[in-house]
Amino acid sequence: MRRVTTLYSSSVGKKIAMALSGIILFGFVLMHMLGNLKAFEGREAMNSYAEFLRVVGTPIVPEYGVLWLVRIALLAAVGVHALSAFQLWRQSRSARTHRYLKSRSQVFSYASRTMRWGGVIVLAFIVYHLLHMTTGTVHPDFEYGSVYDNLVIGFQSAPVTAFYLVAVGALSIHLYHGLWSVFSTLGNENVRVNRIRRPAAAAIAIGMFLGYAVVPLAVVLGILTLG
Amino acid sequence: MELDAKIPSGPLADKWDLHRFEMKLVNPANKRKHQVIVVGTGLAGASAAATMGELGYRVHAFTFHDSARRAHSIAAQGGINAAKNYQGDGDSIYRLFHDTVKGGDFRSREANVYRLAQLSLNIIDQAVAQGVPFAREYGGYLGNRSFGGAQVSRTFYARGQTGQQLLLGAYQAMERQVAAGTVIPHLRKEMLDVVVIDGAARGIITRDLGTGKIEAHVADAVVLATGGYSNAFFLSTNAMGCNVTASWRAHKRGAAFANPCFTQIHPTCIPQSGEYQSKLTLMSESLRNDGRIWVPVRAGDSRPPHEIPDAERDYYLERFYPSFGNLTPRDIASRRAKEMVDAGHGVGPGRNGVYLDFRDAIQRLGKKAISERYSNLFAMYEKITGEDPYTVPMRIYPAPHYTMGGLWVDYNLMTTVPGLFAIGEANFSDHGANRLGASALMQGLADGYFIVPLTVGNHLAEVAPGGVDADHPAFRDGVREVEEVQERLLAVNGNRTVDSFHQELGRLLWDLCGMSRSEAGLKEALAKLPELRESFWRDVRVPGSGDNLNQSLEKAGRVADFLEFAELLCWDALERDESCGAHYREEHTTPEGEALRDDERFSHGAVWEFSGVGHKPARHREELIFEHVPPSQRSYK
Amino acid sequence: MDFTLHVWRQGTPGSKGDFETYQAKNVAPSMSFLDMLDLVNEELTRDGGDPIAFEHDCREGICGSCGMMVNGMAHGPEDLVTVCQLHMRSFSDGDELWIEPWRADAFPVMRDLVVDRNAFDRIIESGGYISVRTGSAPDANAVPVPKPDADKAFDAAACIGCGACVAACPNASAMLFTAAKAGHLSYLPQGQPERYERAIQMVHQHDEEGFGNCTNHGACQEACPKGISVDYISRLNRDVLRARLAGVAFDST
């Protein structure tokens, strides 16, 4: 553990922590997206998939056991990701207290420049999304266990869908920069990987956006209905 | 003035070995009590500081740069010679020794040159162990090339950055000692005087270039590694900051100056493009392997080069030297180019260059082959001039590049002031009247890594550590004198900038004491220099104050010293009434117009003793004896 | 050509600076950017003003002394050049030029465009060398170095320590410098014994100096006059990771 904490004490260590937690979170958003697409198989499929997540591992582990384990791990990953981001941001901010009057950032991609704000938007969205779809606190007509209905009702509100699309857009841009730079942070030296990492990251990010966007759009367009 | 070169007895090949045995050693426990000052952190200074730090001395390393890694050694392109004979082409220590003595036109000390050739082997080993990335062949072993007309391939190189890579090696070795606490770096501190107490060097006076503070630093020995004085000519290939100040102030404190007129002019530089240009850029000499040098036959011909037919082109080097052609040695190629430009055949916007044309080589070998050989140089040329050398011939012109002269030192690299050492380009060195390509890095590192750390020890063994402190009247006087000079400079408040004087001095030296010199011209220069110096002190404007970063003030001090030093340069050129190596006197030429040496009268080093500003210095001689390489006349016809 | 210059002027390290406007008239396209500043300074001096302080020395792009932001770009708009090799023909007649010093808290401004880059020396001091005493080296050809490794080492060793990477980085990070220096030695057999300790010591010092961290923007690589690749940063990251997880001894004092 001491080795991990001393590693974390350096800026490179914080980046590595960010990369590793980022990989966990990427795994989650990928699975979550695939789960969302269950909606196209209908109410039954989706609700039973949700039920499966609740009971997976039984009878060896109690009901909700695995789910909470994953939730705790994800929460920890979000925590590490955000904390290291915050600490690195603070380090960088104090590294240049006097800013340039003119700065021309031709080379930084939009994605890399928006990592921090994009991250904050995603974080805010996560909080909203949990209150919306998990606890139902801000949901107009939430019924525990009726995942499919909650989803369709939730996205019938245009502002909610718009916010959702903006958020997954931000997430995708965030993912693009994060995905290719994870190879750099973790020290990949394979030339072939380095050559394809940017296009591959772009493809995954676009795929992710489409995968997430298609469900609410289907609701708005009336393809997914309560009926 | 008594000059004892202290050349050890014994056979040539054993001298250094025997000398190392005879030198006195400092008790290891006492080493840390000795303070040694090293001024300059180029190849010689950084390597000396690092090694003396490793030996346990307390070393103070001074540089006027913001970092010890910036000295102009960093700009050396070509390579470094060593008699490794890795190519198995017949090289040996003796051959490198022989070539260096001959290349120096028989004006260097055989014993020193032999030691240099011996140590060349250790330098390469040391550099590679430090991680210097020399060129390698596919088998992983070191590559070599032939350089500067040498018949064997003994030059080690690192792309075009040999100087940078070697300097970084020395700098990193020094930083390691900084971490160990044995070397204390003093950055942005310019040495402005040597302090001599009871006839021995006991410290220096510096100006902190950031705060302007004048400070005294005490030591038991002082090593000057402060480079050459090519910038006396204003336009040279040296960095802007290179100056003669440290050497000159040491000279004024009693250190004799040897052979100042041996200044090397490099033939392949990019010509000056405008009056405000402050620096000339060197192009590697290797370009002459394939480029043909020419000027228009008709003086004043202003047609673009491609419109001038072959019949109206004068390939003058090929005409004068049918067997060596464009590959004649540096001094000859430079002199001939100047003759052509002076006669009105100069080309380019300023009519101040000659063509170096790759048209025929591209036709013969193809553009690809030429690109493989020179693409980086062509790119550099295009970056600077905006012209594409594949289609428009390059323009080149000679420029001051290196100075063989410097502070006189004995075999121990100690000047005529006990405890004051000079290494690298700052001393009058092993290159005689002309330095061979790829030998400067070798000499700087031999001095710094392998010679001066031992010979300083030999001196320190006889000096009790400490004894004086900065309150000694000599230090207080030194500080006051430096402050006074600075106040005088700031007080003139005239109408001309420092650079305008430097430019004027440079033009005067270039015209009258440059590539070719004559008695009449040198006398004219000696008559004009005092006037120029006086008008400097009457009319210079140095803005700002002395108590913060003031680059004009720094420059003014350096130019003031160049203005004094220039007279010594001209005196030496005048009194050396012969032509040899880089020193070409128009009166002494063979019927073919080549340099004519006079071994009867001038087989010696001219060693000058300071006798007051504006007074003719006293000339002493160190006779040179050639037991192994009998003097002969060069011929390149 | 004529230019309007807006130059950062600051008298002393702590003082408050500001932009001053100057006219550069009759500038030849063949002049280097620093020749142009020389010209402005000559006039300023003649007119009784204070010339603009800027660091420079070799003027051939190798000493690493010079460096300034020109219109928000480190070393100006051209690729692979230092500002001393930038020529005025790269600009158009009448252009307005904003000239600022490198901005990073680890590079405090000393005067005008001159900054203090000693932090780089201290990063080297923390481990950027191979510990070999003078005289203890084996024969230079005793250890062959595969050419690809030698070439990679060389590409990193080309760093001139100018600080453009820090200046261009939105985080004012010196990771490209640190990675180039560590990377050079890490590719050579001679550099292996100290490789991992070197990596953590140098990164530690980098952080101590107050540089920002790397977020893989790649601005440093674009600004680098020697074209050093950000891939060396990957390599340094990996060396740090390995070193820490293997518990390589580390002296944080």
Image: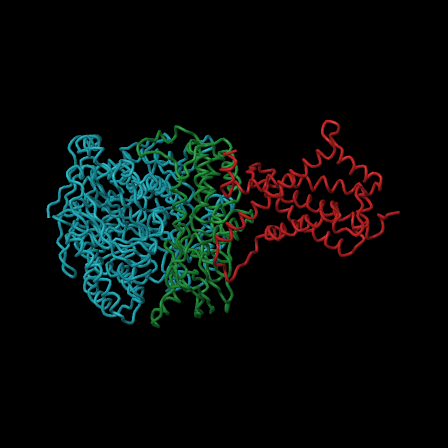
Chain whose colour in the figure is cyan: B
Residue furthest right in the image: A227
Q: Position of residue A48 (x, y in %)?
A: 81, 37
Chain whose colour in the figure is red: A
- Residue B542 sits in quarter: bottom left
Q: Position of residue B414 (x, y in %)?
A: 19, 43
Tag count in the figure?
Answer: 0
Would residue B146 be found to the left or right of residue C155 on screen? Answer: left
Which residue shows up at 85% across the image and 51% down it?
A: A222
- Say whether residue B577 is visible: no
Would residue C83 be found to the left or right of residue A115 on screen? Answer: left
Residue furthest left in the image: B2
Against C112, residue C148 (above or below) is above
Indicate the colouring scheme: by chain
Against B582, residue B412 (above or below) is above
- Say whether residue B351 is visible: yes
Front-most of residues B280 and B473: B473
Which residue shows up at 79% across the image and 55% down it?
A: A157
Colour assigned to chain C in the rendering is: green
- Residue B149 sits in quarter: top left
Which residue shows up at 14% across the image and 43% down it?
A: B623
- Residue B18 sits in quarter: top left
Residue furthest top in the image: A60
Front-most of residues C33 and C203: C203
Front-most of residues A82 and A182: A82
Q: Position of residue B399 (x, y in %)?
A: 33, 55
